[in-house]
Amino acid sequence: MTAKEKASVLLKKFKGDSYIFGIDCISSIGKLSSGLGRRVSVVAGGAGKKWGDEIRGTVSRTLHEYGIKLAGDIIDGAKPNSPFEDVFRISDEISRQHPDFVISVGGGSVIDAVKAAITYSTLRDKYPDINDYFGESRVSDMLAKIGRKMLPSLVVQLASGSAAHLTKYSNITDMNLNQKFLMIDDAVTPDRALFDYGYTRSMSKDFTMDGAFDGISHCLEVYMGVREDKLKEVEDVALTGIELITSNIKTAVKDPKDPGAREALGLGTDLGGYSIMIGATNGAHLNSFSLVELLPHGRACALMNPYYVVFFSPAIEHKLRKVGAIYKKAGYVKTDVDKLSGRDLGMAVAEGMIALSTDLGFPTTLKEVPGFSDEHMQHCLEAAKNPKFVSKLRSMPVPMSTDKVDEYMGSVLTAAKTGDFSLIRNL
């Protein structure tokens, strides 16, 4: 069985008939919407762009064929990183249109914003402060207390990366603080989803790379931190995802229209979404939320993860050997990882990850990033102590308490600033 075939089997096991994916499946939107209601609010990205007009027309046409009416004008999607302001605007429009269900069409930023907007439109009369929604299962608790349910939703994903169409996560950003915040709740998971991988052929080179590394980070961070009772469930998912992305990203960047490479990145990043529904991301993702003004999310994770690999390495040797074998097969790890252990193993894998980033032109140290200062490191450390992010600390292979953040996470950030692995202090 090829990696693509394995990925398809795993995704069908994960989502069953609620998820349609592949090349040229966009016309199934109407069929997938059946049973959700007769009036729909559609939120779509790409306003004023050719691809945006085309996808909006396709969605409207296929819904009409199935007797589903738009509850109002198509609502414009969100800017990158899902700013609070866009969440509030979309929420207002959904409430005004009063639909039976909601369809979101776009990449991760649009989808996350719509997840949060549906949540806010459902709860805001009782819970007007959106900051109350961040953290684990806060939304479900509020819904239960007032006896409400979320509007059903269908997501049409257009970009390989976040896998927001498959998950219980909604990342939205307070642009005034330059800080992302996270809802982690089964209640925000879309009811149904569709991803036509063919649409990703219009993704730019940078967007393609950022999305691919986000997918690698989902797989890698979950795999590193997953507990033994879930290891068997996640191992095939995470390692297949990493293999598909690392072995196809250069082809997709070199030839954006290559359907095989685009399908592979779609499948691989989808497996990243599957991974984060089994376990959770940790250090690199947590830091990326505080580097939002400097780097796209996937690029921030790509920069930070090699340093966390070294930090975690004594605790996850058996996992790193399998990850290292994938990077070796792709030509980025040069040593025999089976003969290494501890930090030596971690550094070999980390160097392979850095080699891939270098090959694609990504920064590999914080000091290379325009605008970076030590204040950003301090921002990362302070955010890590916020109780709303405690799940990220708990999900590390070596769980970190907030009183250890300055010393140990601080050493990882200092190493990432300079590129010097020797500065990392292992717990």
Image (cartoon, grey):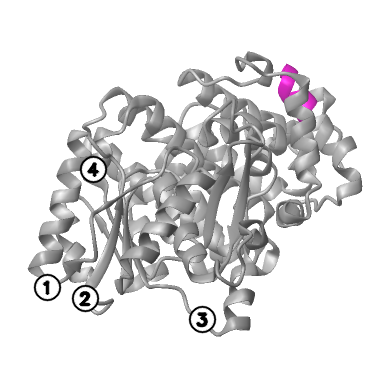
Tag shown at residue 199: 4
Residue occupied by mark 2: 38
Q: Is residue 232 visible?
A: yes
C-alpha gap between disc 2 and disc 3 = 20 Å
Please tell me whether mark 2 sits on a helix, a strand or a loop. Answer: loop
Residue occupied by mark 1: 67
Q: What's the magenta region? A: 413-419
Q: In the shown orientation, is residue 156 left or right of residue 67?
A: right
Residue at horizontal 37%, vertical 62%? 94
Q: Earlier in the sequence, mark 1 or mark 3?
A: 1
Q: Quadrant of the N terminus?
A: bottom left
| Cβ–Cβ under 8 Å for marks 2 and 4 | no
Residue 188 image offset from top left, x and y in percent = 49, 66
C-alpha gap between disc 1 and disc 2 = 7 Å
Q: Amino acid at mark 3?
A: Arg
Q: Nearer the viewer, mark 3 or mark 4?
A: 3
Q: Is residue 335 above or below residue 405?
A: above
Q: Is residue 190 above or below residue 348?
A: below
Q: Amino acid at mark 2?
A: Arg
Residue occupied by mark 3: 148
C-alpha gap between disc 2 and disc 4 = 27 Å
Q: Nearer the viewer, residue 257 or 178?
A: 178
Q: Quadrant of the C terminus?
A: top right
Q: Earlier in the sequence, mark 2 or mark 3?
A: 2
C-alpha gap between disc 3 and disc 4 = 36 Å
| Cβ–Cβ under 8 Å for marks 1 and 3 | no
Q: Find residue 423 and report its image quarter.
A: top right
* Main SS class of the magenta portion in the image: helix
Residue 221 image offset from top left, x and y in percent = 62, 47
Q: Earlier in the sequence, mark 4 or mark 1?
A: 1
Q: Find residue 258 and report its image quarter.
A: top left
| Cβ–Cβ under 8 Å for marks 1 and 2 | yes
